[in-house]
Image (tube, rainbow, N blue to C red):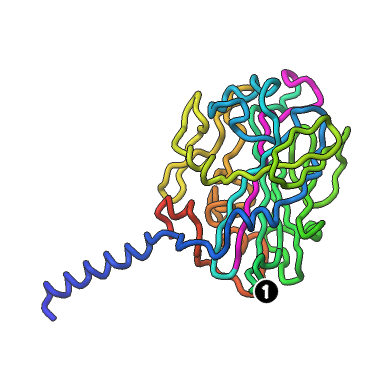
Amino acid sequence: MSASRWRAFGVLLLLVLSACRAAPASVGPSVDPYALAYRYAPILLHGAASDQDFPTRVDFDGDWVSNNNWENQPQGDLRAFVYYAVMETETHWFVFYSIFHPRDYTPEPCPTSRGCHENDLESLHLAILKDGTPDGRLQAMTTLAHGDLYLYTATPEVQGGYLKVQGPVQVEDGRPVVYIESYGHGIYGHPIPLEPSHVRYRVGEEAQRPSGISGEATYQLLDIYDTLWARRHSIGPGKTFDRPFRYWGRRLPAAFDGDTFGEDKANTPWGYIQGRGWRLHRGDWFLDPARAWAYHARFSGPFSFRYRFHPYRADLGLP
């Protein structure tokens, strides 16, 4: 083969390899994502001292401006919602849930406590093995509480990795149970004091506002892709998000825009920096869950890094 033909062949090979690397990480889910998220939607035992502890949606006040949420909290629609996302590899489904509050606050007056800020988004993540059954089998859960991730296991096939196992996943009616703090809203998979009272939330077809700081209510699921992700380009003061960062060269917002008791303090689902160690990038907990899970824990059974369905990576042009 002549030198010119070798060069042409080399260029063609590079183009093919580049196309393969940029292939979307989404060929279609093997299950209905909403049905799977609903199936495993957690039971929330949510500490409550006031209606500031009622989880709701980011646009609870009728707009997508995030730096007015502290001011609008008292008169906003505080019906209960939980955000979700589903990603899939050849061996697992990863289901991510995020819980939003307009205020993160303290028992002490906020002007002097230095512990308050506008907007709050805490999250939890489930690893579900595709074992041939319609819903798979829950293997592990990580939860976020402020600056830390906590690992809980549902099977001996999963052991601690970068994260230490905190205990077993508590399950009720096939759903994980989580405990959420009053005031700061950190999420745990083990019992914590829920003071001065708590509300018990279950997923349902109706989003309800609790009648008080004790009792029960149902929450509705909202797809992160159609809500928060769809507004990821709304970045800057007076918009939905702020504090942009680069994820593999792609510009994304790390935080919700906020200006009360601190600037931009609440992370987006794809903006967390927790649990990175020295192997993970900011955002991997959401945007590369297989890689994050393989670092956070050790799976003795089958575990694939190849995504079958990950619309967020597909939108970013990542494999």
Instruction: Give the farthest residue toward the bottom.
Output: 1
Quarter of the image where the N terminus is located: bottom left
At a point 76% along the width and 55% down the height, the residue shown is 176
Is 241 located above or below residue 294 in the figure? Answer: above
What span is in magenta? 92-112
Q: Secondary structure at mark 1?
A: loop
User: Is there any visible trace of residue 217 in the rendered image?
Assistant: yes
Whether residue 252 appears in magenta in the rendering, the answer is no
Residue 291 in percent (x, y) is at 56, 61
Residue 208 in percent (x, y) is at 73, 36
Is 86 located above or below residue 3 in the figure? Answer: above
Quarter of the image where the C terminus is located: bottom left
Residue highlighted by disc 1: 300
Nearer to me, 64 or 284: 64
Give the amino acid at mark 1.
Ser
At a point 61% along the width and 74% down the height, the residue shown is 302
Nearer to me, 214 or 194: 214
Is 308 located above or below residue 63 in the figure? Answer: below
Residue 300 in percent (x, y) is at 67, 74
Q: Main secondary structure of the magenta part?
A: strand
Residue 91 in percent (x, y) is at 58, 70
User: Is there any visible trace of residue 171 in the rendered image?
Assistant: no
At a point 17% along the width and 70% down the height, the residue shown is 7
Residue 280 placement: quadrant: bottom right
